[in-house]
């Protein structure tokens, strides 16, 4: 199947899935578990955001753990919760944080303009890493060939998990609760496909995406989570299209 045909067929299904839960529930997060997760993180983020704001106002710097330039944006600026607690800006570290056995790292995005606290889901990160290892093993044993499935976007295919040791692995979206597709570029680097979630957020907002705009911003605005292990998406022919890494 061609890339255009694959995208058209897939996005038709996306549109149906986007509209159905919205008609039935009128919200972006129809699943009760997702709503519970949002509530638990809401309180944690309020506390950490307040602590970060106070720290920045008084110290003139952000309480972040230093990361290298090569670290992707949605993994880069982790909040230094131990420092916030140790210096009296937090009474205690929230149970939702990885540092307390939770499943998320708290990050800062928009660090130069409006530092904003968000959550990086470690389950998503771990499962993408697991698929990456499976793809690497496949390449090693198949003369550098990739376990490629359907062509979804220019330069990206679905990962055919049936060809790998990760056959039973599934990833559910923190945004919609829908099962996500693992995609990979021509080098075999694996990502999670957020096209469905982006489309759902745009539909909910009635937004008009601008040419060249990175559509992941709609996920930032609609949730406490960041789209970790993602690539940029732009709007083309009425749908989100994954863009090659620069």
Image: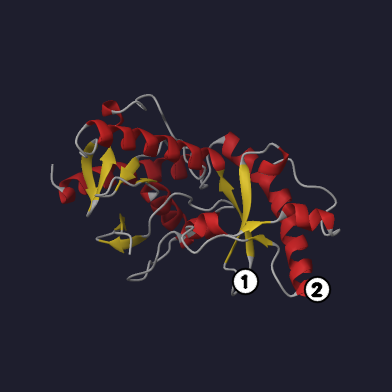
Q: Earlier in the sequence, mark 1 or mark 2?
A: 2
Position in image of residue 158 (x %, y %): 28, 41
Q: Which callout, 1 or 2, points to the residue nearer the camera?
A: 2
Which numbered tag is attached to residue 58? 2
Query: Dot 1: within a 10 Å radius of its alpha carbon, few (fewer than 14), some, or many (20 or more) residues?
Result: few
Task: Check contact, mark 1 vs mark 2: CB within 8 A.
Answer: no
Quote the CA–CA distance across marks 1 and 2.
16 Å
Q: Which sits in the foreground, 70 or 195?
A: 70
Residue at the image point whose x is 76% and y is 52% from the top: 82
Against 232, residue 25 (above or below) is above
Q: Name the residue that disc number 1 marks.
A: 114
Give left or right: position of 198 versus 98.
left
Residue at the image point whose x is 31% and y is 30% from the top: 161
Position in image of residue 77 (x %, y %): 59, 60
- Badge 2 marks a residue whose secondary structure is helix
The C terminus - image quarter: bottom left
Q: Which sits in the foreground, 212 or 58?
A: 58
Give left or right: position of 51 versus 235.
right
The N terminus - image quarter: top left
Against 194, residue 112 (above or below) is below
Against 166, residue 93 (above or below) is below
């Amino acid at each position: 199947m061609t890339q255009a045909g694959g995208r058209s067929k897939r996005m038709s299904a996306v549109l149906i899935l986007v509209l159905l839960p919205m008609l039935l529930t009128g919200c972006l997060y129809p699943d009760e578990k997702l709503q519970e997760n949002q509530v638990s993180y809401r309180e944690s983020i309020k506390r950490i955001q307040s602590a970060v704001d106070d720290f920045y106002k008084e110290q003139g710097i952000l309480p972040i753990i230093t990361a290298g330039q090569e670290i992707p944006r949605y993994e880069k600026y982790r909040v230094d919760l131990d420092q916030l607690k140790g210096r009296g800006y937090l009474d205690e570290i929230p149970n939702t944080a990885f540092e307390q056995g939770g499943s998320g790292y708290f990050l800062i995005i928009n660090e130069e303009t409006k530092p904003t606290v968000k959550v990086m889901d470690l389950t998503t990160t771990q499962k993408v890493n697991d698929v990456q290892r499976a793809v690497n093993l496949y390449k090693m044993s198949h003369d550098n060939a990739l376990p490629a499935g359907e062509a979804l976007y220019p330069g990206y295919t679905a990962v055919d998990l049936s060809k790998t040791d990760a056959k039973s692995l599934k990833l559910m979206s923190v945004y919609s609760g829908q099962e996500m597709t693992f995609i990979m570029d021509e080098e075999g680097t694996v990502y999670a496909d957020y096209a469905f979630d982006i489309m759902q957020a745009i539909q909910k907002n009635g937004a008009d995406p601008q040419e060249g705009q990175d559509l992941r911003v709609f996920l930032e605005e609609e949730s406490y989570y960041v789209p970790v292990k993602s690539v940029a998406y732009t709007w083309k022919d009425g749908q989100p299209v994954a863009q090659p890494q620069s």
